[in-house]
């Protein structure tokens, strides 16, 4: 199963699958059903961070330096957790400026400078090519291990012909893939949907492969993690190698690696490509900011266990970088090594694909196009269609980059371990970080500062990492490593200015970033920005300012026709028609182009050529300049004023809405009051009409009946008098109620004795109660009960309570009891009867106006001559008591089982 | 001798109506609430009812509705009495099948005339 034909068939079959997936992704995109419009796919594509270096090298590094490999993943985790602050701004800038690569990003920030863009592209090319080589090396190596095991995988490329090396053919296939799916569109800022889909798929494959081998090692080769850890604990030399103290450079090594990984995650061309350029929706960052770190956790879960197992088992004799392969091979398993090989292949090819696209875009847009435009602009512009040229340049660049990577791999790759190459690249691309990050937040950073800082940092990197690396590979005389160049010890590359005790990467990172940042800041403070630079600096630092989104920054003049012919040459006819399409209908070619249109044309050109070249081209047809800094700032000011104004308007309208709401509620209340008033008037009229009806009827009877018997005459006249009294009482009560409700009831509060008042009231009703046959029992617990009150009104209340009780007492043997007692700081007067009582739900309603307690079944008041109540007595009584600071309510009768009304008044303060 | 049933919860109004009807030559029965009225109708059906609307328990409208749904009393002349002067009530009463509608306080002569007219029509 491990024969060459089988392995090759599987490997190239896997690559063919990538083609299918990418083609499918592109087809879906054309149909408008994008497969990459999902934060999950976005997060998976970011996992292109995990290359063959992760796949094979993590275990190697863990076996050699303990858990320090984790720092490589902690840095990106940190960066992703900061995504809402940092990466979101990068994405926003890139989408408004149609940024095509990190070189374009930095060039655009510093006034769309061609030279700075070229410098970044060059550094990226030099810094990252070894990294591509590393991936190819991993493929070669893993293939050799797989096929030759258990023979040692001694494979000296330099001694063989290149066509024997499988990675050469892989590189060739990848070149075809990248050309097919990476250069479909001219516009580099357009998404490569098929490619991203394939990358996301590769991320899944490598994760599954790694987890499979991890589970196999821990649970099949060993009896679970505890067995493995116990065995490691028994071998002190291994547990020591895996401890924290194994990290090179100690604490500084930790910090240095962490910073390095953080910066590299943002500046590696492929990371910038997937993270920023290929981002389709800013909001995807939200999920990716936790999903990607989760992916990193998953793929690192088994690194240490595999490293431990590799050191414990006989397979440990082989290179730690190959443990992932040799462990399952040593167990005689055939399928898993093949899966591991595919996983490593997916990790390697994913990286190579994205890195090559990013680099080729930089090479064509930042290195070649500006040269062509400058050297023979006239010559070039005179040729009709240039769109084809652009794609051609990019395709040639792809092939050249892969070739370069392969050459690097074939010539010097053997002398480096996987980790070493990776970290060297990291430090190289970290040089972009100062120019990029500081430029995003400090408006004062100038092009000169950025260029010189970058150049100096790059040179420091070459001197402290690249040259020593060459020297160690035997390409240079290695003596300068130990003795320094020309015998100058303080210039030793690994201990510059006598700085010793650092690991070589932290050492290089420290010095290179120090000179880089120092020059960037220092020179920026003493140089001036050109107008374009000022504009771009403002646009970058203020990217999150919403006012900038739709601002046109061109003031110059040109015609539609001139723009059209320019775009036609570089983008082709159909793209030009789309860009110049005017919603207000087609306009003549000699019509002046509005600033928005010029901006749109520049953006379109930027997407294809990079911002620097686009600017040169637009400048060639537009007379006049872009907006200067003052104009931009005034636009920003106006925008912020508008925003402030809008905010206030919104505030005002919120207030208005609130007031409207309050008004509506007030109106609702008024309406309710109005309805209650109508109801009240209707009830009053009803109550007044009732006695009036009797009065009128009997008056007419008396008028018409001259021959009525005397006794009937007297009876009828008595009824008229009684009903008239009832009417007067009713009117009095209605007036009382009206006064109470309007707050115009005149009370004359004075100190009085409630006991005396009760006696007086009882005397007043005693006769009447006796007439009705009501037995009234008065129970006064106190001799004196001083309260503050209006004596007439309080007497009215007490009489009303007694009267009610008499009316509602039982028909047979009616009894009423009045009881006065002290209750804390109050006096309580309760009046109870032995009637049917008041059911719970009626107890509050009896205090409503005109509420008549229903009396079912029982004989009417007629039998004992008890007049009906008006239904106003209790509401009035409660109003009066409340006015005097007391309470009036219904409760259970304590002794007589009927209704019980309780009045409570506060004790008067001692005079 | 025609029989008139007076239904009202105000004793004095019942007293006056009883006297007026007797004076006009009718036999009179009284009830002070809706249930009493229905029982009376069941026991000895009157020829005409003077029916107050606001009664405790079953209202005058309820009584009217029940009687009208009973085929035996569907054509029994009924005059509604009310202290509510509102037009909606009058319309509701007439819609439910009252023969007439008298607002309190009323003219005794006019009321007696109405009763007489309805009974004559009925006869």
Image (cartoon, grey):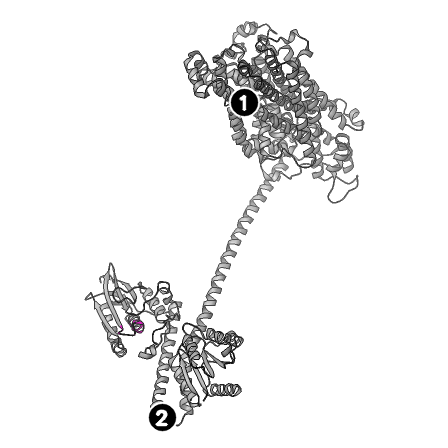
Residue A793 figure quarter? bottom left
Give the residue at x 53% y 6%: A482
State which mark lies toward you, 1 or 2.
1
Residue bearing mark 2: A709
The reply to whether residue A714 is in sight is yes
Q: Which residue is mark 1?
A: A212
Query: Residue A777 location, x and y as percent?
Result: 22, 71
Query: Left or right: where does residue A662 sit relative to residue A36?
Result: left
Q: Which chain does the residue under circle 1 lie in?
A: A
Q: Position of residue A366 (x, y in %)?
A: 68, 24
For this view, does A868 lie left or right of residue A391? left
Q: Residue at x 78, y 42 (%)?
A: A587
Is A811 part of what is drawn in magenta?
yes
Compared with residue A149, is residue A383 higher up or lower down, i.e. above or below? below
Q: Is residue A581 above or below residue A668?
A: above
- Tell me the number on the disc at residue A664: none
Q: What whole-number distance in Å separates the C-alpha atoms at marks 1 and 2?
A: 121 Å
| Disc 2 chain ID | A
> Is the residue A266 above or below the residue A693 in the image?
above
Judging depth in this view, the residue of A765 and A21 nearest the camera is A21
Name the residue furthest left: A783
Q: Is residue A257 visible?
A: no
Helix, strand or loop at label 1? It is: helix
Residue numbers of the magenta segment: A802-814
Name the secondary structure under disc 2.
loop
Residue A781: which quarter of the image?
bottom left
Check disc 1: other Cα within 10 Å, few if <14, some if 14-19, many if 20+: some
- Residue A762 among magenta residues: no
Please report contact status of discs 1 and 2: CB closer than 8 Å, yes or no: no
Whole-percent x, y for residue A308 in the image: 48, 16
* The furthest residue to the bottom: A707
**Precedes in sequence: disc 1 or disc 2:** 1
């Amino acid at each position: 199963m491990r024969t060459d034909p089988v392995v090759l068939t599987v490997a190239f079959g896997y690559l063919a699958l990538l083609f299918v997936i990418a083609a499918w992704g592109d087809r879906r995109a054309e149909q408008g059903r994008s497969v990459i419009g999902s934060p999950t796919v976005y997060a998976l594509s970011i996992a292109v961070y995990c290359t063959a270096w992760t796949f094979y090298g993590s275990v190697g590094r863990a076996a050699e330096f303990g858990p320090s490999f984790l720092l490589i993943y902690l840095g990106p985790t940190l960066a992703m957790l900061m995504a809402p602050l940092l990466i979101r701004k990068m994405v926003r800038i890139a989408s408004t400026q149609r940024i095509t690569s990190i070189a374009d990003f930095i060039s655009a920030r510093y006034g769309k400078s061609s030279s700075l863009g070229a410098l970044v592209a060059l550094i990226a090319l030099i810094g990252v090519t070894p990294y591509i080589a590393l991936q190819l090396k991993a493929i070669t190596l893993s293939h050799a291990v797989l096929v030759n095991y258990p023979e040692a995988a001694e494979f000296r490329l330099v001694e063989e012909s290149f066509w024997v090396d499988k990675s050469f053919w892989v590189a060739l296939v990848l070149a075809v893939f990248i050309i097919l799916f990476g250069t479909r569109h001219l516009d580099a800022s357009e998404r490569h949907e098929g490619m991203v889909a394939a990358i996301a798929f590769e991320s899944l494959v490598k994760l599954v492969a790694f987890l499979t081998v991890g589970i196999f090692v821990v649970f099949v080769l060993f009896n679970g993690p505890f067995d493995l850890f116990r065995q490691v604990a028994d071998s002190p030399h291994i547990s020591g190698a895996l401890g924290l103290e194994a990290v090179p450079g100690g604490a500084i090594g930790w910090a240095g690696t962490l910073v390095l990984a953080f910066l590299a995650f943002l500046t590696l061309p492929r990371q910038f490509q997937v993270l920023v350029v290929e981002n389709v929706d800013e909001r995807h960052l939200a999920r990716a900011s936790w999903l990607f770190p989760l992916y990193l956790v998953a793929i690192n879960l088994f690194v240490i266990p595999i490293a431990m197992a590799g050191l414990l088992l006989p397979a440990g004799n082989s290179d730690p970088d190959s443990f992932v392969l040799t462990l399952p091979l040593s167990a005689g398993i055939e399928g898993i090594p093949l899966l591991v090989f595919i996983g490593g292949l997916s990790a390697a090819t994913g990286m190579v694909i994205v890195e090559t696209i990013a680099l080729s875009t930089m090479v064509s847009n930042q290195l070649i196009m500006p040269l062509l435009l400058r050297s023979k602009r006239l010559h070039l512009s005179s040729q009709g269609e240039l769109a084809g040229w652009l794609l051609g340049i990019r395709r040639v660049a792809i092939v050249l980059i892969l070739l370069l990577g392969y050459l690097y791999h074939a010539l010097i790759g053997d002398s480096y371990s996987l980790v070493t190459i990776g970290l060297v690249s990291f430090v190289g691309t970290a040089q972009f970080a100062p120019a990029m990050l500081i430029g995003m937040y400090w408006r004062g950073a100038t092009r000169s500062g950025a260029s010189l800082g970058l150049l100096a940092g790059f040179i420091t990197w070459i001197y402290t990492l690249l040259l020593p690396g060459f020297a160690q590979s035997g390409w240079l005389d290695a003596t300068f490593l130990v003795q320094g160049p020309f015998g100058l010890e303080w210039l030793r590359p690994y201990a510059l200015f006598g700085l010793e005790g650092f690991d070589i990467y932290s050492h290089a990172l420290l010095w290179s970033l120090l000179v880089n940042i120092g020059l960037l800041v220092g020179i920026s403070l003493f140089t001036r920005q050109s107008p374009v630079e000022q504009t771009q600096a403002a646009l970058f630092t203020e990217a999150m300012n919403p006012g900038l989104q739709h601002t046109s920054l061109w003031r110059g003049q040109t015609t539609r026709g001139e723009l059209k012919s320019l775009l036609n040459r570089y983008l082709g006819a159909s793209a030009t028609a789309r860009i110049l399409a005017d919603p207000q209908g087609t306009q003549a070619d000699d019509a002046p182009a509005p600033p928005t249109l010029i901006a749109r044309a520049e953006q379109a050109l930027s997407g294809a050529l990079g911002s620097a070249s686009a600017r040169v081209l637009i400048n060639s047809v537009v007379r006049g300049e872009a907006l200067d800094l003052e104009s931009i700032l005034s636009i920003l000011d106006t925008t912020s004023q508008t925003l402030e104004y809008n905010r206030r308007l919104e505030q005002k309208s919120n207030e208005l809405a609130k007031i409207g709401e309050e008004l509506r509620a007030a109106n609702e209340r008024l309406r309710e009051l109005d309805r209650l008033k109508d109801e009240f008037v209707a009830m009053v009229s009803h109550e007044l009409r009732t006695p009036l009806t009797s009065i009128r009827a009997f008056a007419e009877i008396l008028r018409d009946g001259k021959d009525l018997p005397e006794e009937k005459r007297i009876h009828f006249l008595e009824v008229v008098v009684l009903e008239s009294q009832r009417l007067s009482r009713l009117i009095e009560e209605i007036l009382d109620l009206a006064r109470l409700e309007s707050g115009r009831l005149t009370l004359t509060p004075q100190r009085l004795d409630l006991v005396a008042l009760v006696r007086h009231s009882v005397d007043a009703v005693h006769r009447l109660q006796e007439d009705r046959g009501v037995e009234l029992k008065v129970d006064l617990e106190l001799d004196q009960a001083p309260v503050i009150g209006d004596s007439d009104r309080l007497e009215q209340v007490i009489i009303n309570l007694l009267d009610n009780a008499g009316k509602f007492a039982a028909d047979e043997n009616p009894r009423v009891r009045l009881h006065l007692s002290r209750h804390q700081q109050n006096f309580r007067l309760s009046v109870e009867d032995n009637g049917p009582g008041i059911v719970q739900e009626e107890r509050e309603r009896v205090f409503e106006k005109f509420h008549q307690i229903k009396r079912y079944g029982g004989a009417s008041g007629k039998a004992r001559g008890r007049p009906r109540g008006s239904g106003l007595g209790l509401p009035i009584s409660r109003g009066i008591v409340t006015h005097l600071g007391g309470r009036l309510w219904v409760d259970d009768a304590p002794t007589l089982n009927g209704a019980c009304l309780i009045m409570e008044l506060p004790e008067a303060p001692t005079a | 001798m025609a029989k008139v049933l007076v239904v009202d919860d105000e004793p004095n109004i019942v007293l006056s109506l009883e006297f007026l009807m007797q004076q006009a030559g009718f036999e009179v029965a009284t009830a002070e609430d809706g249930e009493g009225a229905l029982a009376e109708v069941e026991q000895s059906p009157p020829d005409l009812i003077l029916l107050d609307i606001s009664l405790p328990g079953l209202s005058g409208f309820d009584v009217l509705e029940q009687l009208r749904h009973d085929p035996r009393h569907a054509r029994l002349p009924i005059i509604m009495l009310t202290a509510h002067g509102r037009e909606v009530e009058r319309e509701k009463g007439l819609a439910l099948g009252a023969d007439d509608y008298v607002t309190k306080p009323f003219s005794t002569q006019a009321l007696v005339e109405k009763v007489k007219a309805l009974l004559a029509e009925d006869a």
